[in-house]
Image: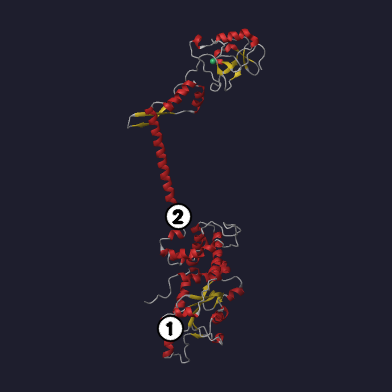
Amino acid sequence: MATEGEVQLQVGKKDDYCCVPRCNGNGRIHLELSFHHFPSEKKRELRKKWIHAIRRDEGPFFKIGKNIVVCSRHFTAEDYRWTLVRKCLKPDVVPSVFEWNTGKPDKLPRKPPTERKILAERTNNAVDIEISLTHSDDEQNFSKQDPEIASNEISVLAHGDENNNGGKLEILEQHIQEKEDIIKAKDKEIEELRERLRIEKFGVNRFSFDDDMIDFYTGFYSYELFLAFFEFIKPSVFYMKSVYYNVKNDHGIRGRPKSLEPIDELFMFLCRVRCGFLSEDLAVRFNIHKSSVSRKLITWANFLYFLLGSINIWPNRDKIQIHMPEDFKLLYPNTRIIIDCTEIYTERPSSLALGSKTFSSYKSHNTWKGLVGIAPHGAVTFISSLYSGCISDVAITEHSGLIELLEPGDQIMADKGFVLDRVLTGSGVSIATPHFLCADGQFTQSQIEDNQKIASLRIHVERHIKKVKEYRLFNSVIPLSIAGSVNQLWTVVNILTLFKRPLIKKKN
Ligand SMILES: [Zn+2]
């Protein structure tokens, strides 16, 4: 607020330009300058003195108005006085400092040249490329600097010496090229590391070129076969339900979590049953939590049990006849199934009653017992549930549901222990077993021959059981922690033996 007789100091606004000839005072650039209006019409004399002092005449090109100002360069320090809040021109002060009376240009002295550093030397055309380094305080200086000079510098940058400019561009392009090359190299490295990770990560992919290892870990004799099996179950995998998770999957239904690819979960499951790896081991190999391993294994056991268990593996008699090997055709042409029992070791339950039930006097250990049957051509066609180890072969055959599947005229081939005469009474089904020793302790010649024939044919079911036991889970002591899913595992493993190499080699 200006009082009478006092010219208020006006801090530069962006549109203020000093009207003094050859002065470039600019409110936008020279923030340190203040700008002052001409005295009002009321102070006509003073106003005339100002106009005279700046050596301009009012006319068509110069009309004093609210935008016409004189910058603080044209006043001396004594021309100012301080009020409580601001610096003001004293009353009746007339601008007096001009280029023409001081001999100095009304321009701030040019700042010293910015530090220049040779960044690179171009040896080809021997032109030194200089790039000025602008420091942070230079930025401010630049704004205070003479705009003409500043703009000159800019124009040099923009339109300067063609050779120099071209050189700078070339250097920049060179820099960009170098950076691009580095990025490309890094990209390649990342890609290689990813590929290495993909290959080295413990999972089925790592062994995709090694059928022996696929066989070792999964029991599938080739990677192609493993993939074919996965493709077969894949449509159902996405609907696999885990009682342990409430996670919604892509299909919007409750389903499996995604921490491991389904194909690797299957691989993990097979590693468990085929190699007998413990959960702790699998957790490390597959980099997931141990509890997660257990959940996945149980989920897969149930899933494969329902999926594979729904496949009818019991062939009709015509199919049995079509695939009947010559040896059987000659000796036991009515054979429908060759059966045997096997026992699986289990931990001793803490309950005494349960412990005694699973105790097998034959194995002197706590066991579960299962009955399996194969067709004469070698494929498994019957898998019973597991029973406590104290059950007899006859009882397990009777309770397993096998007898109901047989038709009159069928013959069962079995070992001596299967005394099924009572069980088979009235069914029309016969049984071929090796002969017991007679009372005199000797076999007749025909008995010996029969026994040898049966032994040579019955060996295939023993081979099947051997294949099941090649899944090390069933060749070791089953922990009670998986007792709840041992039946599922037993069934699944029996069916998985179908994906192993055939039992009987075809004779040419
Ligand atoms: Zn000025």
Q: Which residue is drawn at 62% across and 7% down?
A: 45
- Residue assigned mark 2: 198
Q: Position of residue 54 (x, y in %)?
A: 55, 11
Task: Measure how far apart labels 2 and 1 are at the Cα level.
Answer: 52 Å
Q: Position of residue 101 (x, y in %)?
A: 51, 9
Report if residue 227 is visible in the image: yes
Pick out the residue farthest to the front: 60
- On-image quarter of the C terminus: bottom left
Per the image, label 2 sits on a secondary structure element best described as helix
Residue displayed at 48% across by 72% down: 468
Q: Nearer the viewer, residue 502 or 218?
A: 502
Give 149 or 19, whichever is nearer the viewer: 19
Q: Ligand 1 near label 2 (Cβ, under 8 Å)?
A: no
Whether the residue under disc 1 has CB within 8 Å of ligand 1 = no
Image location of residue 263, percent across then percent down: 49, 61
Towards the viewer: 462 or 96? 96
Q: Which of marks 2 and 1 is nearer the N terminus?
A: 2
Q: In this view, does 115 lie above or below 378?
A: above
**Mark 2 against mark 1, which lies toward the viewer?**
1
Residue underneath mark 1: 329
Asked where in the image residue 483 lies, by quadrant, the reply is bottom right
Q: In which quarter of the image is residue 395?
A: bottom right
Amino acid type shown at disc 1: Lys
- Residue 479 appears in the picture as rendered: no
Quadrant location of the N terminus?
top right
Q: Are marks 2 and 1 in contact (CB under 8 Å)?
A: no
> Is residue 339 positioned above or below 262 on the image?
below
Left of 177 or right of it: where is 248?
A: right
For badge 2, the amino acid type reads: Arg
Task: Describe the element under mark 1 as helix, strand or loop.
Answer: helix
Residue 378 lies, with reference to residue 480, above or below; the image says below
